[in-house]
Amino acid sequence: MRKIFLIFFISLLIISCSTLKPKATGDETEIITYVDSLLYSQIERDLKFVFHRLIYTPQPESLFAIKPEFQIYSIDKLKYRKNLMFVSTLDDKSDIGLYILNMLDPASKELVQKDSAYIFIKNDLWSKGQIVLILIAKDKETLLKHLRKDRNEIYIYFRDEFFRREMNAIISEGHNKKDIEKYLLEKYNWKIFVQHDYYIAKDSAQEKFVWLRRRTPEDMERFIFVHWIDSVYDPYKFFNQVWIANKRNEITKKFYRTTRDDAWVVIADDPESIKYLYFFPVNFNGRYAIRVQGLWRFNDFTGGGPFISYVFYDSTQKRIYFLDGSIFAPRYEKKKPIIKKGPFLHAFKTASEIKG
């Protein structure tokens, strides 16, 4: 369970009581990080280990990039950015360290001194759609301890905000296919967000498989599939890497085939694809899940691309769910399209969740 401590920023940092704040600016993937240069040199490796998580597309790319700022006077220029982070310790006497310390009220400082809190978050502080996060510990050693022990928790704050912004932007367009969403909910007791240019390419109650496909622009393909297994009472025998890889290959060999039906999609059957296949235990909308990311290819080596999968158990329905998003875009940059699969997959809900 996350330990979130929301703080009251002193009047120096409150721009006004008005809700008329500008919209946050800047790159979604940049985290502007205010930190003293000496402290940064001591924690840089661990800080980057938290946020620079590689996605192979097949080029190695990261969702987030740390952009360190060593001079506090630049805050007036950068305080409207989407992602801001302040990193310090209670014994940091630099200009940045003192600025961060002044952001905390006495009760928060006491929590930090006792090592009862080290993360402080404020959304929409200076601009709408902004996340401001403070990482502060009583000393460098304690800060490093949390960076290493709680790296996933820290990362998720920014990742979830990224997902929220993406879904809000898509939903605000108002072009999702509500008829398909309603159909899937009524027929299968689950719902997923269906953007306006996706369509159902395969729908099989017998196979417990639904494939959503997007073909715009014409030379880029995006796929989402949902597969489920009913009447599961011992779910964790499914939560292993061999079963997940074999199950995906079983599904794609049957459904992800070329137009001539002479080739199909595979993963993890050659040294190169195994090299870039990663499995992570994660929290998926409150459930334990396995997140898989890697590269797929046609079995005849004529093409390929990145994919992301989530495998989790729904105890109410006694179902194992396998959600998967992938892209085929030979002539395009692939980082953002595959990253944006995450918000779509996380928008998945069962009927009981919607009613609840």
Image (cartoon, rainbow, N blue to C red):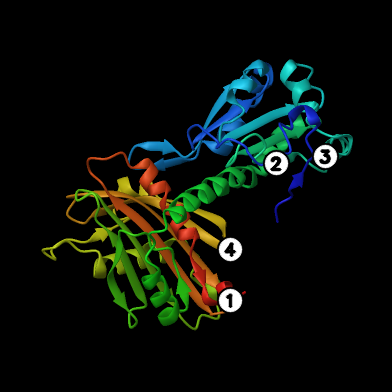
Q: Earlier in the sequence, mark 2 or mark 1?
A: 2
Toward the left, the furthest residue is: 260
Q: Earlier in the sequence, mark 3 or mark 2?
A: 3
Q: Which residue is mark 4?
A: 288
**Residue 214 screen position, x and y as percent:** 28, 58
**Residue 197 screen position, x and y as percent:** 30, 58
What residue is drawn where x is 88% and y is 37%?
110
Kind of residue sitting beneath label 3: Asp
Q: Is residue 77 left or right of residue 296?
A: right
Quadrant placement of the C terminus = bottom right
User: Which of the 4 image quadrants contains residue 324?
Assistant: bottom left
Residue mark closest to the camera, 3 vs 1:
1
Residue contact between numbered discs 4 and 2, judged by CB atoms under 8 Å: no
Q: Is residue 292 visible?
A: no
Q: Which residue is mark 2?
A: 121
Q: Answer few, some or many: residues within 10 Å of disc 3's Cα (few below 14, many 20 plus, some between 14 and 19).
A: some
Kind of residue sitting beneath label 4: Tyr
Q: Is residue 153 above or below residue 253?
A: above
Disc 3 to disc 1, C-alpha distance? 40 Å
Q: Secondary structure at mark 2?
A: strand
Q: Which residue is mark 3?
A: 115
Front-most of residues 65 and 237: 65
Residue contact between numbered discs 3 and 4, judged by CB atoms under 8 Å: no
Q: Earlier in the sequence, mark 4 or mark 2?
A: 2
